[in-house]
């Protein structure tokens, strides 16, 4: 309490902002957020991460991970689909994964696939360049920028109606920035092309001009819309920021920052009755809070951070922390600002003095009563308590409010009691294990009914029931009664459809420990309700329990899909071999054709067991790329003679050309060329050169003294200069051809410098030759070179000449008291002269 205002930062003269730590994240991210697609739900919602960096291994898949706001892992699955462009959360906390082909995958909080929908054939043909997920009064919407630079929008994904927005005249490349706006119950787009702004609605593309725009404003690089869509901010390449209302008719302020590059993120930080609306911008190592004033607030960022706009502030999370940045509310500012004489501040001091049994209590109370401000003081303390995150500060303020209301004859206790109850609920859900860091304003806006839905959605049944009981919400009680028995009874009822029964069972059971959906599904199958059994198996998390029952029900194709989704290759092989015995050859191949993962696994099986079948599969699919790969493998595995290997490689090159894989075709032709050349070298020099890499071939030619042949390979295969120089000096040093090494160094300027010459000579213990190259080393590396050859006197001279204290210290560290005393004295003298300056 004594240092309560220590983290308050003024933004102009009107308002203070503070950054509170919500959680220390424990999600063990190895590479931070830089390589990930990130989506964080509002109202303390979950965080979804999907790595975008391609892995080296083709079999490895980046995981789709969903965490709570505190960094607790909720679910993780390998991403088996086409590359994702954007992630976003719906208002009901479902994850939308927008792919390059325009299909949108919908996942639950626990990575359970729910459904898929497409953004239309135009998006499929032109692919997705950028996408945004937005929320309006109509629901959750999706906006797409296609490869043809056209915008497609759906304002409500639950009632999907695609809108193709008008074409932007002269748009030949993606706009520098764009955003979704909501004006008069209509959803429109604002986009920037250089210094021009355009509004896109259902019928037209209209140029717009910002009111009060400074002449120093340049091209627009970034834009941000506030949480409630009322405010808009734009960042230009001159560092100028325009802030105004989203209807583009009123300017609220402007700010010019020192950065010219666009921020990684720019969001609004506002609240109800805000004194100073602010824009928060994040660069790699800096966070800036700017409002309508000359000053701004700057915070250093030690890690990659992600900003999440909220109703009353901004959440900021990184690999290690999760913080909340917001404007100090009026009640808190009035009570806690230094030397405040506000009634709430006096009441708080009066309560503290009362606990100390001090007579000052009466003085403070009299001062408040004389001004008839005691009800206002109590109100301020209650309101300030609602905005606090720390329970101790909440208790202190509520104790002050309770103390003050004792001196008011007619004071309604409802506000005090409600705040106490609400804060207890908020403190419970803010717990690390639950991880829903709602503020009081967010909680009020969200409502208790929606909060309970979200707790049940997270399968946090115990706390949901406790909250129901604590708030005396009787209609929510008794959720956990004999769930398994109820489910088994439900499957026997005939008055509901299979879909309704399955959903009802899942809503009741969730992920309750000890409940097996496969057992319930088996009971449904026994009752003759096969479709219900299949729907119930959708909720069974153990694929090993799903697949055998599906095979038993003669649903082999569905079993294959489930086995693939599980990621269990043994399970997939089991179903594939079952299908192979059950179907004829044509139907079997057609089934695999519709399941790329199963087809890939069957191909792996054929690589080891049935090579002829594998080739037939590739030919049937006209898969020239894989046919090329097949011939490459054959050339090294099956063919022993060089002519046969070259023939297989030539077939591979032809297939790669048909597949339009120019790189693979060229690489294969180069390999053919290298094989033939190695065969000639082997015949000419009677030494094994076959199957050496290009670099090893060049190295061995130089090592054997065949430098002309090596240089011919260097030219023919366009080996980079730096790589060739390294190969040559390494080989010359190994064969101890020091004369040729020195001659080579003088031929032309070394692209790798001359320190490598020194190092390679010392590696082969030839100090004499190394000393020849040390004076030719670049000045910034010369000290290191002389130290390598043991010439501390020359090293000292080089360090003194460069007046580099670090290099002088390096030389001193190599000196001994007996042998290099003169050198040490010289260096110390130079350091002393340098210090005087």
Image (cartoon, rainbow, N blue to C red):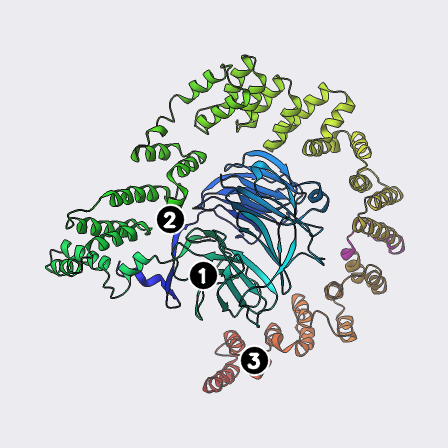
Residue under numbered circle 1: 278
Q: Nearer the viewer, mark 3 or mark 1?
A: 1
Earlier-in-chain disc, 2 versus 1: 1
Residue wearing tag 3: 799
Q: Quadrant of residue 723?
A: bottom right
Rendered-image quadrant of the N terminus? bottom left
Between 695 and 578, the one nearer to me in the picture? 578
Q: Residue at x 60, y 52 (%)?
A: 189
Task: Residue 278: name its quadrant.
Answer: bottom left
Q: Pointers 2 and 3 in contact (CB under 8 A)? A: no
> How dense is the environment of label 1, judged by Cα within 10 Å: few (below 14), some, or many (20 and up)?
many
Dot 3 or dot 1, earlier in sequence: 1
Magenta-colored span? 681-696
In the structure shown, which secondary structural element does the residue marked by tag 3 occupy? helix
Of the pair 747 and 88, the residue shown nearer to us: 88
CA–CA distance between discs 2 and 3?
63 Å
The x and y percentages for residue 336 are: 28, 60
The circle drawn on residue 441 is: 2
Question: Does 614 sit left or right of 416 as displayed?
Answer: right
């Amino acid at each position: 309490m004594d240092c309560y205002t220590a983290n308050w930062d003024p933004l102009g003269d009107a308002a203070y902002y503070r950054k509170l730590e919500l959680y220390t994240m424990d999600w063990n991210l190895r590479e931070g957020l830089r390589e990930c697609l990130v989506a964080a739900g509002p109202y303390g919602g979950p965080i979804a991460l999907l790595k975008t960096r391609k892995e080296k291994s083709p079999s490895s898949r980046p995981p789709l991970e969903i965490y709570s706001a505190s960094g607790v892992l909720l679910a993780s699955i390998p991403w088996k689909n086409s590359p994702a462009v954007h992630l976003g959360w719906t208002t009901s906390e479902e994850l939308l994964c927008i792919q390059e082909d325009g299909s949108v995958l919908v996942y639950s909080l626990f990575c359970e696939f729910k459904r898929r929908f497409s953004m239309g054939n135009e998006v499929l043909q032109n692919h997705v360049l950028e996408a945004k997920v937005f929320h309006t009064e109509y629901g959750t919407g999706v906006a797409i920028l296609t490869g043809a630079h056209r915008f497609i929008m759906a304002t409500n994904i639950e009632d999907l109606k695609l809108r193709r927005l008008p074409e932007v005249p002269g748009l030949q490349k993606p706009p520098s920035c764009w955003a979704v706006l909501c004006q008069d119950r209509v959803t429109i787009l604002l986009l920037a092309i250089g210094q021009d702004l355009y509004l896109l609605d259902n019928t037209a593309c209209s140029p717009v001009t910002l009111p009060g725009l400074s002449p120093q404003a340049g091209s627009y690089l970034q834009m941000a819309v506030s949480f409630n869509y009322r405010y808009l901010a734009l960042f230009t390449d001159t560092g100028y920021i325009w802030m105004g209302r989203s209807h583009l008719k009123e300017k609220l302020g402007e700010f010019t920052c020192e950065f010219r590059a666009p921020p990684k993120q720019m969001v609004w930080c506002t609240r109800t009755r805000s004194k100073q609306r602010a824009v928060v911008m994040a660069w790699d190592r800096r966070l800036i809070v700017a409002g309508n004033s000359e000053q701004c607030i700057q915070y250093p960022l030690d890690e990659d951070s992600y900003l999440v706009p909220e109703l009353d502030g901004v959440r900021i999370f990184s690999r290690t922390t999760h913080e909340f940045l917001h404007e100090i509310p009026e009640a808190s500012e009035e009570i806690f600002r230094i030397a405040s004489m506000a009634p709430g501040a006096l009441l708080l001091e009066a309560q503290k003095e009362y606990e100390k049994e001090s007579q000052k209590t009466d003085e403070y109370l009299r001062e408040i009563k004389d001004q008839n401000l005691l009800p206002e003081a109590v109100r301020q303390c209650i309101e300030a308590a609602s905005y606090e995150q720390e329970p101790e500060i909440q208790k202190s303020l509520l104790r002050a409010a309770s103390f003050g209301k004792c001196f008011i004859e007619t004071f309604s206790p409802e506000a005090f009691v409600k705040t106490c109850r609400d804060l207890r609920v908020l403190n419970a859900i803010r717990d690390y294990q639950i991880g829903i860091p709602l503020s009081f304003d967010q909680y009020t806006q969200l409502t208790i009914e929606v909060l309970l839905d979200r707790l049940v959605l997270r399968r946090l049944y115990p706390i949901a029931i406790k909250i129901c009981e604590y708030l005396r919400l009787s209609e929510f009680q008794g959720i956990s009664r004999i769930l398994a028995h109820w489910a088994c009874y439900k499957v026997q009822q005939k008055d509901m459809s299979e879909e309704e029964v399955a959903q009802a069972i899942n809503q009741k059971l969730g992920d309750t420990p000890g409940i097996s959906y496969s057992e319930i599904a088996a009971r449904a199958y026994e009752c003759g309700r096969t479709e219900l059994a299949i729907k119930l198996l959708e909720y069974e998390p153990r694929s090993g329990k799903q697949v055998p029952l599906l095979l038993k029900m003669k649903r082999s194709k569905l079993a294959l899909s489930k086995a693939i989704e599980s990621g269990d290759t043994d399970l997939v092989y089991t179903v594939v071999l079952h299908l192979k015995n059950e179907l004829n050859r044509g139907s079997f191949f057609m089934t695999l054709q519709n399941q790329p993962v199963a087809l890939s696994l069957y191909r792996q099986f054929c690589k080891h067991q049935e090579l002829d079948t594998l080739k037939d599969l590739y030919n049937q699919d006209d898969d020239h790329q894989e046919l090329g790969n097949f011939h490459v493998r054959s050339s090294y595995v099956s063919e022993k003679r060089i002519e046969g290997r070259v023939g297989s490689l030539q077939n591979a090159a032809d297939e790669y050309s048909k597949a339009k894989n120019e790189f693979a075709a060229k690489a294969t032709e180069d390999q053919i060329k290298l094989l033939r050349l190695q065969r000639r070298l082997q015949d000419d020099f009677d030494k094994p050169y076959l199957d050496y890499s290009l670099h090893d071939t060049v190295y061995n030619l130089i090592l054997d003294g065949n430098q002309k042949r090596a240089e011919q390979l260097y030219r023919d295969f366009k080996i980079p200069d730096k790589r060739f120089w390294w190969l040559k000096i390494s080989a010359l040093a190994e064969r101890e051809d020091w004369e040729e090494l020195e001659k080579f160094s003088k031929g032309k300027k070394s692209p790798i410098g001359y320190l490598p010459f020194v190092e390679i000579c010392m590696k082969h213990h030839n100090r004499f030759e190394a000393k020849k190259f040390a004076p030719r080393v670049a000045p910034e590396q010369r000290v290191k070179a002389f130290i390598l050859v043991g010439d501390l006197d020359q090293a000292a001279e080089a360090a003194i000449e460069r007046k580099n204290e670090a290099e002088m210290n390096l030389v001193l560290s190599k000196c001994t008291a007996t042998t290099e005393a003169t050198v040490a004295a010289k260096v110390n003298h130079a350091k002393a002269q340098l210090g005087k300056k």
